[in-house]
Each structure stands twice: as structure tokens, then as C-alpha cells.
Amino acid sequence: MPGKDRKWYWADARIEGNTVIVSSPSVPHPKEVRYAWQSNPGATLFNGAGLPARPFRTDNWPLVTEGVSPY
């Protein structure tokens, strides 16, 4: 999760009812969240039925490879 500087930090998450609560001591006022946002993510967030959450992001910032041709 990043703050205003858009620098990403690891965070802790927990589920309270239907809400995922995310926090990090490095980011007092978080702006965005990404979960399992990597090539081979480990699932660590599960719902009440034991199913893993899918990777997601709340930001719409351009990605590092946006506009880069693979050829």
C-alpha cells in the first residue's frame, strides 16, 4: 500500500464482516491497495468458505510496462 508518494509498502490485512482492513506502520494515510499483485502470488486472504481472494488493485495508475512493446 502506498501513501501520497506512491511508494509501495507491505501491509497487514484482516477481514471484519464484509470489509478488508489494511494497515501498515509505514503508511499512516494509505491511498491505494494491491493484493497478490505479482507473477506467482501466494494466497493468504480467504473468505468464510475457505476460498482465496483473487488478485486485485484499487489504483488506476499506469503500470511500469504500459505502452512498452514486447517486440
Image: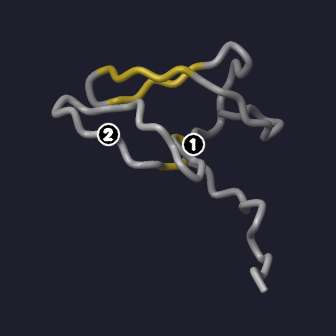
Q: Can you identify the residue that label 1 sits on?
A: 34
Query: In the picture provided, is 8 more to the left or to the right than 15?
Result: right
Q: Is residue 21 left or right of residue 53?
A: right
On the image, the x and y values in percent for residue 54 come to 39, 48
Q: Determine the CA span between mark 2 and mark 1.
A: 15 Å
- Name the quadrant containing residue 26: top right
Task: Tell me the residue at 73%/36% (across/down).
Answer: 8
Give residue 52's mark.
2
Q: Residue extending furthest bottom?
A: 71
Left or right of 31: which side holds 46? left
Location of the N terminus (image quadrant):
top right
Tag in front: 2 or 1: 2
Task: Identify the residue shown where x is 78% and y is 82%.
Answer: 69
Disc ID at residue 11: none
**Residue at the limit of the structure toward the top, as seen here:** 25
**Helix, strand or loop for disc 2:** loop
Q: Nearer the viewer, residue 38 or 32?
A: 38
Question: Could you tell whether 48 is left or right of 59 in the image?
Answer: left
Q: Is residue 40 above or below residue 52?
A: below
Q: Residues within 10 Å of mark 2 (few under 14, many from 20)?
A: few
Residue neighbourhood size for the residue with mark 1, other residues' Cα within 10 Å, grouped as few (<14), some (14–19), many (≥20):
some
